[in-house]
Image (cartoon, helix red, strand yellow):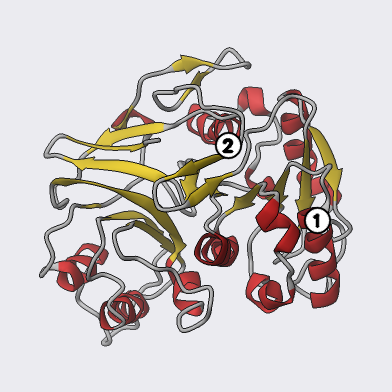
Amino acid sequence: MDRKHFLTTLASTGFGLPVLGRLHKAAGALQQAEGAQLIPPCLKRGNTIGITCPAGHITLDEIKPAIRIMESWGFKIHIGNTVNSSDFSFGGTDDERTQDLQAMLDDPGIHAIMCARGGYGSARIIDRLNFKYFSEHPKWVIGFSDITVLHCHINRLFGIATLHSKMCNSFPEDFSKSEPIVQQTILSIRDALMGQQLAYTTFSDSRNRTGAASGILIGGNLSMIQSVAATNSEPDTIGKILFLEEVGEYLYSLDRMFNNLQRSHKLDNLAGLIIGGFNRIKPDDPGEEFGRTVYDIVMEKVKDYKYPVCFNFPVGHQRDNYALKCGVMHQLEVSGQEVNLREIR
């Protein structure tokens, strides 16, 4: 989505640049929202963010831009053992990735955990992790794509909020020279961690279904959500605002995944549905055209329901991937002119 199509009330940032959203101060202590969702404490200058690789591998050089930017926000950075480690496509063996993430979950000196990148691998270690200390002393877990597995698991089993956002591999080499949309999405991570309540407003898509809803926001990558079906990480969608994004799939594959959500009744009792970026869709084989768009696929599956549906929300595998707090109460308003999504406490 082009920046000119994104409406916002702008506030100044520590970089002297505009940041997306209508921002309101939040309390620094641990908070609990409606629905027994626990919100981890906001971060303060001097707090420590740990960087780990529960999925794909990444080098120290590749995360240096992220380190510089987060340090400029006043945070200390702890680099996990899985950074610079690899086991083929993974950021170390399953044991190494488990141990690194477990150490950060249990370390009282680490106040938030940034997953360095996505790829694949979180599902291989999720059942090895012990969340006992984390459930008693919550901290922000940050990432998207494959990290959706962690969001689903933590939200469902422990009722703790997590942060769906860009990761280290999406931070620009030179922040000052990066595009405004890139700056704004990166700064939305800082604002979320430091206790700001973000409110996003975008122009409405003509294919949206209008309406208003409130509920706990959950979601993430569609294929990852499908991958945790019938496990203890499976999200409970009843009364929730569900957001979905995907990348690099065939249209028939998207239809299959949405069909699974429909048949498993995950779409029946939503408060609202947000469709983010569905990007780099693979072309159909000649003579095997699927004949339906993403809009067709989604609306076919939800045609019998009345809740609001919006398309092209700025979240997903794209430059305009703004931070969203999973497990936090939100208000969604979809009109013919604009879409508003904001946290409510």
Dot 1: within a 10 Å radius of its alpha carbon, few (fewer than 14), some, or many (20 or more) residues? some
Q: Is residue 222 left or right of residue 55?
A: left
Does 294 appear above or below 79? below
**Res. 225 visible in picture:** yes
Residue that mark 1 sits on: 106
Element class at badge 2? helix
Q: x and y percent of residue 62 in the render?
A: 78, 48
Q: Is residue 186 left or right of residue 229?
A: right
Q: Amino acid at mark 2?
A: Ile
* Location of residue 64 (image quadrant): top right
Residue drawn at x 44%, y 32% is 198
Q: Which mark is residue 325?
A: none
Does 138 appear above or below 201? below
Q: x and y percent of residue 139 in the render?
A: 67, 46
Q: Amino acid at mark 1?
A: Asp
**Res. 314 visible in picture:** no
Q: x and y percent of residue 113 in the render?
A: 71, 49
Query: Can you say which quadrant of the picture contains the N terminus?
Result: top left
Query: Can you say which quadrant of the picture contains the C terminus?
Result: top left
Element class at badge 1? helix
Residue that mark 2 sits on: 189
Q: x and y percent of residue 268 in the render?
A: 22, 71
Front-most of 185 and 25?
25
Residue drawn at x 39%, y 67% is 281
Does 290 appear above or below 28? below
Q: Is residue 332 left or right of residue 144?
A: left
Dot 2: within a 10 Å radius of its alpha carbon, few (fewer than 14), some, or many (20 or more) residues? many
